[in-house]
Amino acid sequence: MVKDTLPGEFGSRVVPTQEDIVEAMREVIDPELGVNVVDLGMVADILIDDEANVIIDMVPTSPTCPMTDRLEYSAELATEGMVNSLAVNWLWLEVWTPARLTEDGREQLRAFGLNI
């Protein structure tokens, strides 16, 4: 059998880069804060293998975050067609603080009236 893919490709798609996944994750909005998970600083790490399987380490904004299932589903939708599989690894022992926010995230929260 002849393999029709080039190195760096999975099937007929190119394996995404970390930057590709970060851009896709900007579409995932935290339903409680109204800001995307990248600008909230929730995305801690992204691991991608040669077959486009992706694991995203994420820090929840609260230790009892009730929206993890919804955020995982939104991440799957945002990366659909880019990845072979996606798993979110929640870093429950890592504490989220406002220091994780990007400047864009701070501006978005200020627009909602929060003093960040």
Image: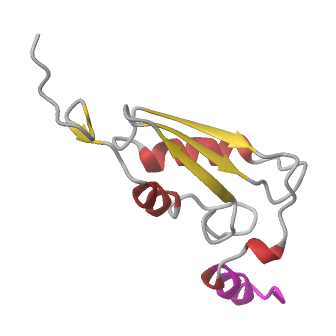
Q: x, y percentage for residue 39?
A: 62, 72
Residue at the far front in the pictured view: 7
Q: Is residue 40 rendered to the left or right of residue 115?
A: left
**Relative horizontal placement of residue 41, taking residue 91 as reference (left or right):** left
Q: Which image quadrant for residue 97?
A: bottom right
Left/right placement of residue 5 relative to residue 42 reads left
In the rendered view, tell whether residue 72 sits above or below residue 39: above
Nearest the viewer among 32 and 100 is 100
In the image, residue 17 lies in the stretch drawn in magenta: no
Residue 109 within the segment the image draws in magenta:
yes
Q: Nearer the viewer, residue 112 or 4?
A: 4
Residue 112 is situated, as x and y percent measured from the top left of the image, at: 73, 84
Q: Residue furthest top?
A: 1
- Image quadrant where residue 114 sits: bottom right
Where residue 113 appears, as percent x and y from the top left, is 78, 88
Q: Residue 72: where, in percent of width, then height?
A: 62, 43
Locate the C terminus by quadrant: bottom right
Q: Is residue 19 above or below residue 4?
A: below
At horizontal 78% and vertical 54% (from top left) the residue drawn is 60
Magenta segment boundaries in residue numbering: 105-116
- Name the residue located 44 percent from the left edge and 36 percent from the top edge: 49
The residue positioned 52% from the left and 64% from the top of the image is 26
50 or 33, nearer to the observer: 50
Residue 21, placed above or below residue 101: above
Q: How many marks?
A: 0
Location of the N terminus (image quadrant):
top left
Q: How is the image coloured?
A: secondary structure
What residue is at 72 percent from the left and 82 percent from the top? 109
